[in-house]
Image (cartoon, rainbow, N blue to C red):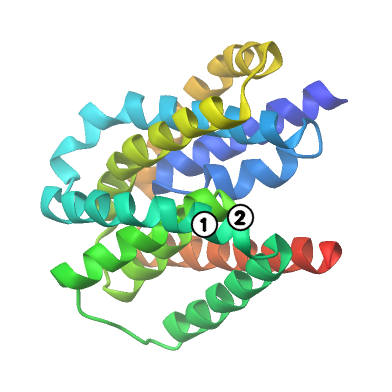
Amino acid sequence: MEIIAFIIIILIASILQTSTGFGFSILATPFLLLIFEPIEAIQINLILSLIISSALIMKIRKDIDFGILRRFVGGSVLGLPVGITIFLLIDINSLKLGVSLLILVLTIMLILKFRINQNKTRDLLVGGLSGSFTTSIGMPGPPLLLYFSGTDTKKEKLRGTTLAFYLFIYLVSLIIQVIFAGTNQTIWVSSLWALPLVFAGLYLGQLLFKRINQNVFRIFTYIILFFTGIYLMIESLGGL
């Protein structure tokens, strides 16, 4: 039964990540935690997310906004240690509850047509938030999704820039995890077994990306943000 669950989780999450540029961590991590120990679920997620981004990066490089990408990376370098500090000092469930409420409120504002203008300062700030989210709750995606949705970014640019940023942020996070938390054989063997599923998801996700228009893409974004907010809220309340 666990094998079937693993197949479904990885395949669907890979399709989502490939077709939208986000979603693997958001969708896969909660369900992988039902099968694996936390350190195993997190590292499997990081490894597979890296593989997906690496496999797509040459194909989507023309869609990357390198100016925004550089500022995201620069901001995240400052945000990563901030996230670790927050993780060590603040109760994790209280942190998750606060983040979940923020995501839900901002998503509702986006649905109600709240929009912001993209600029260099905001790029750095969003990169910093994403870095701090990565090392505190293991989810770099929500700040990027909220920002790109609020600036009405085209789906091609959103996917390309986000996946390129994930190459950096997930690699750094994986190195930090292995150094400070260690690793084990289960993580790498499970990741190896997941590769055929990831590549199937890459193929199917590419087909889906070509078929969804900007409005459908935006609806996908809102659904994923709501899922993230509600998941974090339920998880935090269960631990309080």
Residue 88, compared with residue 9, is above or below; it is below
- Residue 205 on image: x %, y %: 45, 36
Quadrant for the N terminus, please.
top right
- Residue 189 on image: x %, y %: 65, 11
The one of 63 and 236 positioned closer to us in this rendering: 236
Task: Provide the residue designation for mark 1.
Answer: 85
Task: Provide the residue designation for mark 2.
Answer: 88
The one of 33 and 211 positioned closer to us in this rendering: 33
Q: Amino acid at mark 1?
A: Thr
Label 1 Cα crowd, 10 Å radius (few <14 / some 14-19 / many 20+): some
Q: Residue at x 32, y 65 (%)?
A: 126
Quadrant for the C terminus, please.
bottom right
Q: Residue at x 37, y 44 (%)?
A: 209
Tell me whether the residue at label 2 lies in contact with that at label 1, contact meaning CB atoms closer than 8 angstroms: yes
Q: Is residue 210 left or right of residue 138?
A: left
Label 2 Cα crowd, 10 Å radius (few <14 / some 14-19 / many 20+): few
- Residue 66 on image: x %, y %: 13, 47
Residue 5, compared with residue 154, is above or below; it is above
The one of 31 and 5 positioned closer to us in this rendering: 31
* Residue 201 visible somewhere in the drawing: no
- Residue 239 on image: x %, y %: 83, 62
Q: Secondary structure at mark 1?
A: helix
Q: Secondary structure at mark 2?
A: helix
Q: Is residue 118 left or right of residue 129?
A: left
Q: CA distance from mark 2 to mark 1?
A: 5 Å
